[in-house]
Amino acid sequence: MEPADSPPSSPGPSCLKSLDDKELVRAIVERDADAVAELFDRYSGMLTALSLRILNDPADVEEILQETFLQVWNQAARYDAKRSSVSTWLVLIARSRSIDRLRSRQVKLRTATAARRENPETHTSPKGVGNVLMQERRRRLAEEMASLPQEQRQVLELAFYGGMTQSEIAERTGIPLGTVKTRTLLAMKKLRRALREEIGELL
Amino acid sequence: METNHDGLEPIEETIVERLLERLNDDLVPANAAWEAEAQTLLREYTELLGLMPYELEPTTPRSGVKQRLMETLSGKAEDRDAAPQPAEAVVSPAPRWLKAALPLAASFAIVLLGVVGWQSFEMAQREGTIDRLSEQLSAVNIEKTEQLAQYRESLERMQQQLSLVTSRGVEICTLHPKVAEAAETGARGTLFVTSDHQRWYLRIDDLEPCPLGRSYQLWFVMADGSSVNGGVLDVRQGVELEVTSDSMPDGTVAVNVTLEPPGGSDSPSGPTILYGDEVMQVL
């Protein structure tokens, strides 16, 4: 996979670029820092966007990114391929840390539209052949998320990006808890069916 | 990949809720005792969460982030290379449940100590109450025992009196008032004497208590007019006077009650209050 648009990293063996994600994690277990750099190149763009979407604070986002990859460095041996793909593992670490930071600093959650409008200068389109896959995934995700009914997308975004529990969502929106649960489940089911091919690639 | 097991509906809902709410820091354990379909569901939804950020435009981190990361890792690597070290232990932060459990356990211990202390105090209080009640019960028992003895004594006396007054050949002598004052109050006496003239029982009613500095005294009058002391009578207001004895002087022909100095006299000196000499045999 080609790295995202980033300055030349610390010199690492070019063979690392030919390794898949799991092989990179194995290299990290062997204490290969260059493998971390390669993983950083592959996923920092997405993880930064995710963290920014949650926190809306570039300074916090940088810390989250550091913490995420430090956790990868420290806990690579605990990665279990049966539980998730490497990219999902990274997403869940970054999301969890971002939500923890969100809760601890009581950062106000803004709408997705406002967050995107406020940070146009950080938008960078990835380049390279290797990003075709990512671009395709992005297109598919955007397509399927947009096809969700607004009320389902709302609760899903509040849960995923806002880190809110279903009870908190119900309290925030005034929607009955049972309705929140139903809409969340329907949204996830729909996405799971629609993205079965993409999910299959990660299994 | 599609699973249509109806029984998985609630599991599916639980999976979605738990994954979104990060109820497991490191994902749901892969060794959960669920059916294979549930495990598949879990994995698929986990990957779905991993795909969701792809809808966002990727954002290049600000310059220096990667460099700082690599410097940090290099520092860790150099420290490791500088001196032989054991395999780097996985740094696991204390589980969240432990961080929450310790203060909870401390609070629980404090509460438990307080409860134990309070209960000990309560027990001591109750033991004291039990001791006091036991003492009171003992005192009541003693009092009741004494009362019972008195009742028995009284009953025996009454039985004796009944036996006397109903004995065969019992004689009755009525004592009448001899002075106006006694007559006004209706004072009277009844003397029961057994046929052998030994045991006797005297009952006096409505006799006013004697004046201060005086006392009533009972006399057995002989045929020659002499009197034998029968004892000082303790007359109380509203209380029937009963006197009994197992002996009566031989030759007694009459009985009277006189008013004497305190403690009585050797011979009648005061006025006669009650007098009776007519004997009637009842049975």
Image (cartoon, coloured by chain):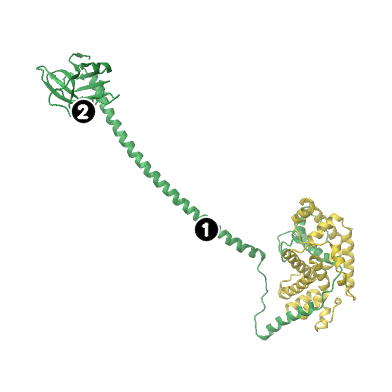
Chain colours: A yellow, B green
Circles 1 and 2 in contact, beta carbons < 8 Å: no
Which element is circle 1 on?
helix
Q: Is residue B184 visible?
A: yes
Q: Position of residue B243 (x, y in %)?
A: 22, 25
Q: What's under tag 1, amino acid-wise? A: Leu
Which element is circle 2 on?
loop
Q: Is residue A63 left or right of residue A134?
A: left
Q: Position of residue B58 (x, y in %)?
A: 85, 70
Q: What's under tag 2, amino acid-wise? A: Gly
Relative to B178, say whether A67 is above or below.
Answer: below
- Residue at image x 85%, y 71%? B59
Q: Chain of mark 2?
A: B
Q: Residues within 10 Å of mark 2 (few under 14, many from 20)?
A: few
To which quarter of the image does residue A86 belong? bottom right
Q: Chain of mark 1?
A: B
Q: Which residue is mark 1?
A: B113
Name the image quarter holding the C terminus of chain A.
bottom right
Name the image quarter holding the N terminus of chain A.
bottom right
Q: Which mark is residue A45?
A: none
- Residue at image x 10%, y 17%? B225
Query: Distance of mark 1 from mark 2, alpha carbons?
Result: 74 Å
Q: Residues within 10 Å of mark 1 (few under 14, many from 20)?
A: few
- Residue at image x 25%, y 27%? B157
Q: Which residue is mark 2?
A: B213
